[in-house]
Amino acid sequence: MCFGVLSWLNIFYQPQNHTKEHEIYLVLSDSRTHTNFIAKFMYLIFMFFCIFLCPNILILQKVNIQKRIVLAPMNEKIQKENEKIFKEPLKIGDLTLPTRVLPAPMAGISERAFRDLLRRFGCGLVYTEMISAEGLVRGGKKTWDIMDIDGEDFPVAIQIFGSSAEVLTEAGRIAEAKGATLLDLNLGCPVRKVVNSQSGSALLRNPDYLRKIFSSIRKAVKIPLTIKMRSGFGDNPRAAFEIAPIAEGEGIDAICLHPRTREQFFKGSSDWSQIAEMKSLIKIPLIGNGDIFSAEDAVKMVKETGCDAIMIGRGALGRPWIFENIIQILEKAMPLESVKEPSFSELIEIIRLHYRFIISRKPERKAIREMRKHIIYYFKGFPYAKDFRAKWMGAESFKEVESLLSELSKINPPPFLQEIGFS
Ligand SMILES: Cc1cc2nc3c(=O)[nH]c(=O)nc-3n(C[C@H](O)[C@H](O)[C@H](O)COP(=O)(O)O)c2cc1C
């Protein structure tokens, strides 16, 4: 709008005190009166667009945003069933979980401190990030360090990845002996290094071999055994639909589906209709995963797909309270409008708690490095996030971090955060 007004002034303003450049300008204008007329006409149209159409477009966008959270119409009976299901505990094999809202395993994120933090927000089961079966069997120190569940509050699921039935089976035994409550097999990782080693989503290409893997691990471990898969790979984009009944037949206790193919990585949106389709194919619990970033999304997925549980990954980055919000809506029957984001001072307290969980287990330098990646997410989308982050990235010791935290907790909250809804 401002640009439009300035352009308008610029076109009709004729300088009175002519400098040499002005004279040249006027001469040029005179010799191009015709062109100048067209230019003025174009600016008039531009102004019209600025004044009348832009606000309309903004209104339309608003309507679209609102539309996104309008729930899809659904058979009333199924809807009632779903609502009932989410108020009951989830049974996976002989394990009973108090909640059906689960955090997704995330490499580099689902470390011990993050898992401890998630429990504070109601997660009844937490996952380690994917752990190399090869590394576990070979006794690699780095791999064993990732399986850091000693003394952890239970239940905790260990996720493994690998390519060989023998190695995966041995790794399953190790995870069970270490104290895992549940063993999950990764059939979804799209990363090239993992795929090149025939692990993760690459296994979706070989349903027959997967049958062997399932049956071998199933015989070796007593704890609940689950799989987490994408919908397909390469020329079989719907491999998951072939694999799900095999898994059920071999004694897998639950399936998590992230309905994107390997080739999609995180592109586009996940196809929730595939979760609904898989639900009608199997009797064991189905966990729906993909693109849940809000309580509205969670309600929508449950209503649209009829899944037995939901799993949230990226939506929890820098927003661990998302689980509490969704549990309140889906399992405690609170109205959608009651969902609240934390206040600024609460956010700082959450960051402090997360940081304390990290430093209780890691030496100073490692702890500060681990916290930095979470800080990027905590302040993502804030106006002036760059300044916040720069301060954090500069902190090199516990002392500096502590003083930064107390400095932040004194701000109550800055005006630009009040503008975006922080109290
Ligand atoms: C940073 C990052 C790390 C991930 N690491 C793992 C992993 O270790 N194991 C796994 O099964 N999936 C992993 N995933 C995939 C997520 O578990 C989840 O399936 C995916 O992000 C889709 O869910 P979302 O849309 O809620 O994020 C990872 C995703 C992200 C973003």
Image (cartoon, rainbow, N blue to C red):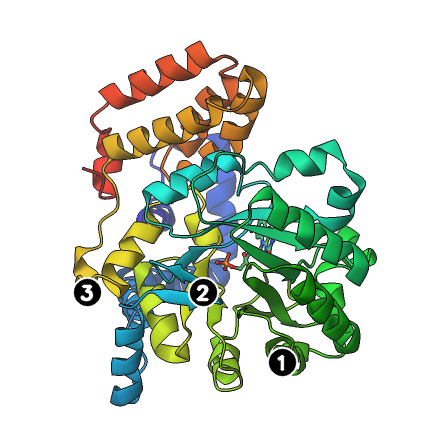
| Badge nearest the viewer, 2 or 3 | 3
| Label 3 crowd bin: few (<14), some (14–19), many (20+), radius 10 Å | few
Residue occupying image coordinates x 30% and y 17%? 406
Residue 71 visible in the snapshot: no
Per the image, the residue denoted by label 1 is: 249
Q: Nearer the viewer, residue 267 or 224?
A: 224
Q: Nearer the viewer, residue 376 or 286?
A: 286
Q: Position of residue 193 (x, y in %)?
A: 78, 51
- Is 269 above or below relative to 241? above
Mark 2 or mark 3: whose residue is earlier in sequence: 2
Per the image, the residue denoted by label 3 is: 333
Residue 402 visible in the snapshot: yes
Q: Which mark is residue 306?
A: none
Q: Is mark 3 within 8 Å of ligand 1?
A: no
Residue occupying image coordinates x 22% and y 29%? 413
237 with respect to 181 (left or right)? right
Q: Label 3 sits on what residue type? A: Ala
Q: Label 2 sits on what residue type? A: Ile
238 with respect to 282 (left or right)? right
Q: Nearer the viewer, residue 195 or 151?
A: 151
* Element marked by disc 1: helix
Image quadrant assignment for residue 246: bottom right
| Label 2 crowd bin: few (<14), some (14–19), many (20+), radius 10 Å | few
Taking the image in four quarters, ligand 1 sits in the one at: bottom right
**Badge 3 vs badge 1, beta-carbon distance below 8 Å:** no
Per the image, the residue denoted by label 2 is: 38
* Element marked by disc 3: loop
For this orientation, the residue located farthest to the top is: 399
Q: Label 1 sits on what residue type? A: Gly
Q: Is mark 2 within 8 Å of ligand 1?
A: no
400 with respect to 67 (left or right)? right
* Element marked by disc 2: helix
